[in-house]
Image: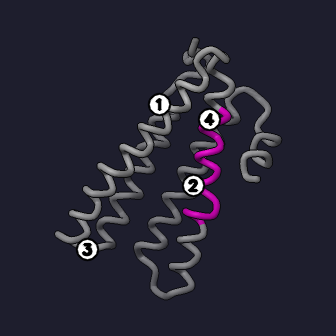
Amino acid sequence: VVHRVVEMRIAGAGVAKRTYVLSCAVGVLGLLLFAQAPDAAAGVAGSLLVSGIARPVIRTAGVIWVNRHATGAVRATVHSLLSQAEHAGEIVLGLTLAVLARAASTTVALTGAAALLACAGVLVIATREGSHKFG
C-alpha cells in the first residue's frame, strides 16, 4: 500500500531522493523523541514516526530509486544486493547498538541509531542525480 501511494506522488527528477532524505529526517526525529520520551504518549509518537512513517517510506523510496536507475537486465540483482546490504547493516549495527545500550543506556543507543539514520540521509544528499545508472 505504501509503495503505491508513494510511487504516485514521486514523479519528477530528484523527488525520490528528497523523499528519502525527508523520511530519514522524520526517522531521526522519531528516534530522538522515543529516546528522550518524558512519558508514554511521547514514546508512542516517536515509535509511530519511525515504524509507521519513516521506515516504510524510506524502503519504498529506495525501491523506486532502484526501479528508475537500473535497467531490466540488472534490476533484480540490484534489489537483491540492496536488501542484503540492508539486512547485514541491521545485524551488525543492531548488535553494536545492543552492546552500546548494555554498556551505557538505551537512550544512548537510540541516539546512536538516530545518528546513523542522519548519516544515511547525508549520504543520499551527497549523491548526484543521473550519476547512478545501472546496467
Spatial CA span between label 1 and label 3: 33 Å
Near-viewer residue (115 or 58): 58
The residue indicated by pointer 2 is 55
Mark 2 vs mark 3: in front: 2
Cα separation between marks 2 and 4: 15 Å
Between circles 2 and 4, the one closer to the viewer is 2
In the picture as drawn, the residue positioned furthest to the bottom comes out as 39
x, y (%) of residue 60? Answer: 65, 44
Contact, mark 2 vs mark 3 (Cβ under 8 Å): no
**Kind of residue at disc 4:** Lys
Q: Which mark is residue 22?
A: none
Of label 2 and label 3, which has the lower sequence position?
2
Secondary element under disc 3, as helix, strand or loop, is loop
At x 51% / y 26%, what residue is drawn?
127
Where in the figure is residue 3, as x and y percent of width and height?
72, 46
Asked whether residue 73 is drawn in magenta, I would say: no
Residue receiving disc 4? 17
Residue 113 in the image: above or below residue 45? above
Q: Which residue is situated farthest in the top direction here?
A: 135
Q: Decide: few, some or many residues near mark 3? Use Cα within 10 Å; few <14, some 14-19, many ≥20.
A: some
Query: How are the residues colored?
Result: one colour
Quick check: marks 1 and 3 in contact, CB under 8 Å? no
The part of the image, by quadrant, that contains residue 49 is: bottom right
Q: Is residue 24 left or right of residue 106?
A: right
N-term mark: 1 or 4: 4
Q: Earlier in the sequence, mark 1 or mark 2?
A: 2
Q: Which mark is residue 81?
A: 1
> Which callout, 1 or 2, points to the residue nearer the camera?
1
Task: Please name the amino acid that badge 3 sits on.
Answer: Ser
Q: Which residues are magenta?
A: 49-64
